[in-house]
Image (tube, rainbow, N blue to C red):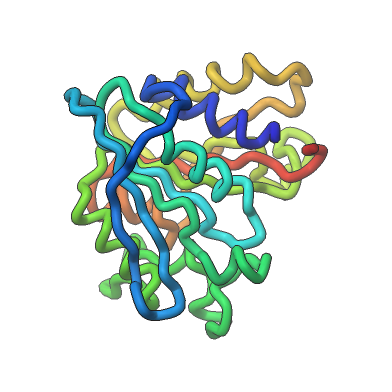
Amino acid sequence: VKVNVTFRSVVVGFFLLGRVFGAEPSGGTLLEGTGQETPWHRVASGEPGPVVMIVGGMHGNEPAGARAAEQIRHWTLQRGELIVIPRANVGGLRARIRFVPNRSPATRDLNRNFPKTVDENETVGDLAAGIWRLVGECKPDWLLDLHEGSDFHQINKKSVGSSIIPTKGVGMEDAVQKALSAVNVTIDEPKKKLVRLRYPVNGSLARAAHERQGVRSMILETTVKEQP
């Protein structure tokens, strides 16, 4: 699937993490026994390098990120450590809906439930709390949140599809350019190439991880349109 190739190109080109071979990750399960069990996985190379967290399936109607993250968790690494949550919103993915099922309109969007820029409140709901706690425990250097837009941003400005949305921070400009170069070389049509957008929305995991925990973060948006 092209969208998975896009995710893979960005992660390999950006972090130079490794190749697609089998690995035996460790890990655990968030919210065990609640009906919202969310597995996470750790792959360690044994060599010094960045700790990278990859999250897929934040929105249940965007399955490409979940599928890509499931593949990525089987990589062996050349260096560093990889933490993967393939299916963050398990209930939403099962129901094929954007939101966490059976939540109020104010709390159902998982990617608005993380600590906000000017707000004393922390996370909203136990699912966001579990993911946020794992970020704090693993202390990643980088965080990538994998999403799927409805269209190509260069063609339809109402969609953020086919874009990289980074936080501010030291090293982000170079990182984004490396990521864009890695993926755009695989795309022939100029209007379908990925572009940089600013910045992650307030309440998103990427923004909260950067503002509250100093993690260099970005949202990677592929597009569902015209995919096999």
74 or 6, nearer to the observer: 74
Instruction: Determine the image quadrant of residue 175.
Output: top left
In the image, residue 45 above or below residue 109: above
165 or 109, nearer to the observer: 109
Residue occupying the point 45% across, 78% down: 35
Instruction: Determine the image quadrant of residue 60.
Output: bottom right
* Number of marks present in the image shown: 0
Residue occupying the point 29% across, 71% down: 122
Instruction: Determine the image quadrant of residue 203.
Output: bottom left
In the image, residue 93 above or below residue 100: above
| 195 on left or right of 85 | right
Residue 171 spot, x, y in % from top left: 31, 26
211 or 91, nearer to the observer: 91
Residue occupying the point 58% across, 22% down: 183
Residue 214 spot, x, y in % from top left: 24, 45
Which quarter of the rendering shows the C terminus? top right
| 216 on left or right of 37 | left
Residue occupying the point 30% across, 58% down: 28
Query: Does any portion of residue 115 appear in the rendered image?
Result: no
Residue 211 spot, x, y in % from top left: 29, 51
Residue 158 spot, x, y in % from top left: 72, 49
